[in-house]
Image (cartoon, grey):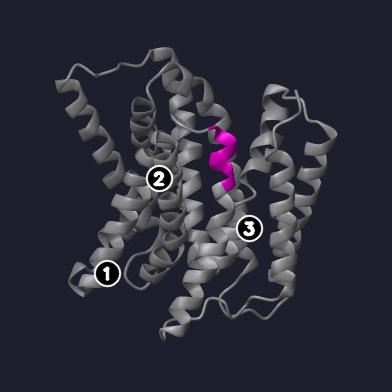
Amino acid sequence: MNRLLAHLALLVVAFTYGGNYLVAKGLMPDLIGPSGFIVLRVVGGGAMFWVLRGLLRLKGGWESVDRSDLVRLFLCGTTGVAVNQLLFFNGLNVTSPVNASIIMTVNPILVLGISAALLGTAITARKLTGIAIGGVGAVALLIFSANQANIYTSWQGDLMILINATSYGFYLVLVKPLMSKYKPLTVISWVFLFGALWVIPIGGQQALAIDWSAFETIHWQGLAYVILATTFMVYLLNIYALGHVQPTVVSIYVYLQPLLATGFSWWLASSGGTDYTADLSWVTGACALAIFAGVALVSRPSAA
């Protein structure tokens, strides 16, 4: 039963992330600037994590961190929240949700490469092939975006998404020893706190410039979706899922995000909304397949 619920949680996570590309895109930049949006997301999400920690403290679940780990937590906040989220929303602001979702799937490849560079993790021939194939797919997508007269896609936005995925890869490597030492909620609370130290000065002006009187009900719902669902709920669901299935199973669900983002984009277009699929072509599909193939080779467990 727990495994079934874990898969259900991962499916909810995939749908939530798939929808996030369009929901966030729909609010930027007319209502909220991308950097200002991140201020709301980090401060709002971080506050909820700390409130949850406070509630657990009442039940004796408070956990302190060693001073020696504060530097690593600061680096995690820098790479996993500040650089990661600022570049993601600024990139999404100037490229299509479909391209962004495709590029984000390259993350397992980046994590392996970073682990090899920083930790000396061994890379088998199969995984090296996966890195090469996925890397070619990502670079080809950037080149294609730069050389086409696109409506919603830009190579600058795609590049920011790729750098964002790289920064998140560094975060996953840096945070691993902390996750084995502390409770996940303890780590993420500090990570968001340190991330806020970066995003507030950078995006504070955009956040203060938001015209809240221009918000309609659907805009408030979109904002709540990004902060409550994509930032807070998804994290808790991922923690639950990782407690009942292997990380390799979790990684499989990453393939659903571009498929869902594309499906949601088609649905939006058919409903009279913006057609973010207008820039799709066989080249986009080929690049996506190359990235998927690379991730599959990298993520598959090595034979014992």
Q: Which of the two labelled residues, at mark 1 and mark 3, occupies the earlier sequence position?
A: 3
Q: Which of the two labelled residues, at mark 2 and mark 3, occupies the earlier sequence position?
A: 2
Give the x, y percent position of residue 241.
43, 37
Give the x, y percent position of residue 208.
26, 58
Q: Main secondary structure of the magenta part?
A: helix
Mark closer to the observer (2, 3): 2
Instruction: Determine crowd level at label 2: few under 14, some 14-19, many 20+ residues with C-alpha closer than 10 A.
Output: some
Q: Which residue is mark 1?
A: 219
Which residue, as the protein is rendered here, is positioned at the far front?
1
Q: Quadrant of the C terminus?
A: top right
Q: Which of the 4 image quarters holds residue 190?
A: top left
Q: Is residue 49 above or below residue 261?
A: above
Mark closer to the observer (2, 1): 2
Q: Can residue 54 be seen by looking at this rendering?
A: yes
Q: Which residue is mark 3?
A: 159
Q: Can residue 164 be seen by looking at this rendering?
A: no
Give the x, y percent position of residue 156.
61, 64
Q: Which residue is mark 2?
A: 9
Give the magenta-colored segment's residue range: 246-252
